[in-house]
Image: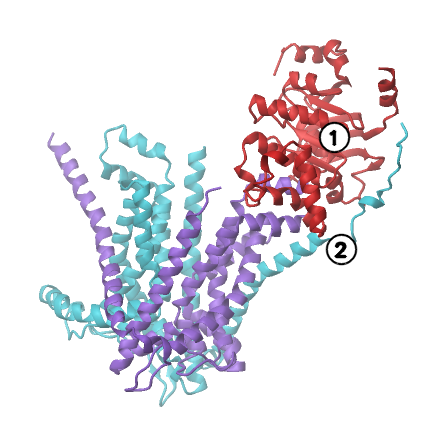
Amino acid sequence: MKSKTSFSKIAYLKAKIEGDEIFRIVSALFALTTILLVGLMVYELTRGSWLSLQKFGLLFITGTTWDPVFTLNFGALPLILGTLTTSAIALAIGVPISIGIGLLLSEYVPKRLGFFVSFMVELLAAIPSVIYGLWGIFVLIPFLRNNAYPYIQAVLGFLPLFSGPIYGGGVLTAGIVLAIMIIPIISSVSRDVLSAVPHSQREAVISLGATKWETCKIVMSYAKPGVIGAIILGLGRAIGETMAVTMLIGNKFKVLPSSFFDAWYTMAAIIANEFTEATSDVYVSALIHVGLTLFLISLIVNVIARLIVWRTLRLVKGVSRG
Amino acid sequence: MDNYRIRKLKDWLMRILVWSSLIIAMIPLFSILLDVFLNGAKAIDMDFFLLPTPTVGEKGGIANAIQGTLITLGLASIIGVPIGVMSGIFLSEYHDSKLSQPVRFINDVLSGFPSIVVGIFGYVLIVSVIGFSVIAAAFSLALIMIPIVTRTTEESLRMVPVAIREAALALGIRRWKTIIFIVLKGARKGVITGVLLALARIAGESAPVLVTMGYWRWWFSGLNRPASNIALNIYLFAISPFENWRTLAWGSALFLILMILGISILIRVLTRGKYE
Amino acid sequence: MMNRQKLEAELSYKFEIENLNAWFSSKQVLKHINMKIKEKAITAIIGPSGCGKTTLIRCLNRMHETIPDAKVSGRVLFNGVNIYDKDVDPVQIRRKIGMIFQKPNPFPMMSIYDNVAIGLKLNGVKDKRKIDSIVEKSLRMVGLWDEVKYELNKSGASLSGGQQQRLCIARALAVEPEVLLMDEPTSALDPISSAKIELLIRELAKDYTIIIVTHNMQQAARVSDYTAFLYLGELIEYGPTRQIFENPKNELTEKYLTGGFG
């Protein structure tokens, strides 16, 4: 059958350069920018640390002196210890509270109220670090110094950790504020992981006559890796926290503090406190070196945390489907 | 029977503990908000909004800090929002690309970096060349914005139903036009929310500003010079020994909290809007 | 009667489908389809679920291949041009061949006016008066104009199901296609709206070639001029609707029509 009007394919020819291809490439380039920037970050941090790396090498991490004036010897071990200690205190205080809230949101509270509660907890996350520091200096420290620490020392003072002069700030205080700051992230991720546990698991236990708490225990054991992931995420956050810590911890470089009530230092705090005053090139480089170390530790912790959380969410959802 | 009573007791006890954990967490929240409002209110008067940072003993305000902060945040947005939105578009619309996994992973990781480290990056890259400047601070802040905007943009785009894309395709509309004029348009509320979230976050960031801009007492005088910054000022004023500065610290904190609260409320209003 | 038959004999074929095969990954859903679709007629495609009806029409506007891991082989001549030729731009094909989906999918983020106009605007038409007149013409063609002419700014999703589907048809008509592919256009609608759309289809057939996929045999009998029966990806029988329904030549066709399966 002949066509009445003949069309040639010219009417539908593809253009040489397609708008779609260009757009795809452009958006890919933008997306690649992030990868590029992170790579550049690693490079620049290393470049900035070069003087310090040359002078101290890997011994930087084990060095325990910080002398910007005479010998220009710098070592980061106390800083690393300080970071880990304050983070450990933060976890010790913050994790039970966060998991309690996570359980509350996932198991105890109906959806509508849950939105409101989540909002309140999220407000904690919205408060900037400096304001935690500001409140810490003028409200928390006086309170702890007058109303809390003396009693703690009265009871636990026989332990070296709790003996020694109390001035209000210091390691424990920083740990307390850090605990408050990491509650939102640990509790929200815990809630997500706990909620993802399929209902069939809960129903199975309830039909056997379990109490609410016993059901919770089952749910938690199911989602344990995910909750651990949430905790590690919180750890990652605590490690990198800068302003609140530097405003409360006392900023004293020493190998070990004399007690929880004593002043100390963290990696982030020393950078914030000394960066703008750093005079010599080696000094600046040492501080950047601290930053590089902080970056690497934080990177490892965050990657581990993300991997665990991802895997748990996929596992839990996978089982509920099959 | 006894065993049952013990179990019931434990259940009741745990219920109390779980609720107490919430109450314990709320105590600092209310304490902070209360103190910021009470102490900050004392600092607020006309001068607060009109005068720049004072020297010791003088009367002053945060006018220059507001100016500097707005400019810095604006520049950070100009850098961060396009990169974030386009990355979000890429992750959502071209999700079968081999690049998607690494990009998404890197974005997640980037969002977990300590902000002080991002600040040092800005220092080594830009301050070493131009000096302490708004550009350096804006760059660092943009890096903090990007993962947030990328994630929310991707999520919002994914929520647009496939049927919409098919309808547009069947009309003979080019893919890129479909994405920009139809799909993105349908997701605009979510995208704007993401940008606002990112803004609220970087408004409060002082660590990166500290190492890329430092302290500035005067008005804005060029992108290659520093500018005043509300969050950073809070830090510097708080640790200073001067009474008028400490008062300004509380006032600035109140202003900052109100700004962030305002943005949060704006976000809730936007997302409650219409349910498609 | 004689004139009509003569006219029909003279009308050319809009589509000549030659040895069309289609796959979803490794599963073959269309096998060796050969058919010629008459211009400005209504061709119905019927068959039990999963027989490949939707895939067949999606091959006609090159939508099938947009699904990941989907494959097509064979030739589809549209106005004599093989739309699967490697030099042909599928986007331009789709402007000439419109599609209506089973579930009405107007753009909810746009007004009624913009829904109809968007195809024009994004294809470069800038003259507002021209757009206005095409929007009105399209809405009139589907019988929506009087119902919505004072509410053109309302969201496209604020209409009832039947109205939404008519809006989708208006949207497709606005870009001035030659063909309308309809994938079960009334299966998500109530009987009254369905009847309105069937009337509309018969109206539109005066100017457009229409291919309609339907699982409702009675609808095919009511509306179409030609009917094709597909089973398990193969074209079993194809001919004038009257002949297919009154005198099916294939046993399978007869079985399906008498409700033997699916």
Residue in the foreground of this view, choosing between A7 and C89: A7
User: In the rendered view, how is the structure colored?
Assistant: by chain
C-alpha gap between disc 2 and disc 1: 30 Å
Residue in the foreground of this view, choosing between C95 and A256: C95
Residue in the foreground of this view, choosing between B72 and C65: B72
Residue C212, image quadrant: top right
Up-down: is C10 above or below B55? above
- Dot 2: chain letter: A
Q: Which amino acid does label 1 sit on?
A: Asn
Residue C203, image quadrant: top right
The chain displayed red equals: C
Residue C106, image quadrant: top right
Residue shown at 67%/12% (left/top)?
C257
Q: Position of residue C110 (x, y in %)?
A: 57, 45
- In the picture of the structure, the residue carrying the numbered disc 1 is C21
Q: Where is residue A73 in the image (x, y as percent from the top left)?
A: 38, 84
- In the picture of the structure, the residue carrying the numbered disc 2 is A17
The chain displayed cyan equals: A
Q: Residues within 10 Å of mark 1 (few under 14, many from 20)?
A: many
Residue B5 as seen in the image, left or right of residue C202 = left
- Dot 1: chain letter: C
Q: How crowded is mark 2: few (under 14 residues within 10 Å), some or many (20 or more)?
A: few
* Residue most extreme to the left: A154
Q: Where is residue A274 in the image (x, y as percent from the top left)?
A: 36, 80
Say yes or no: labels 2 and 1 on the same chain.
no
Residue C38 as seen in the image, left or right of residue A174 = right
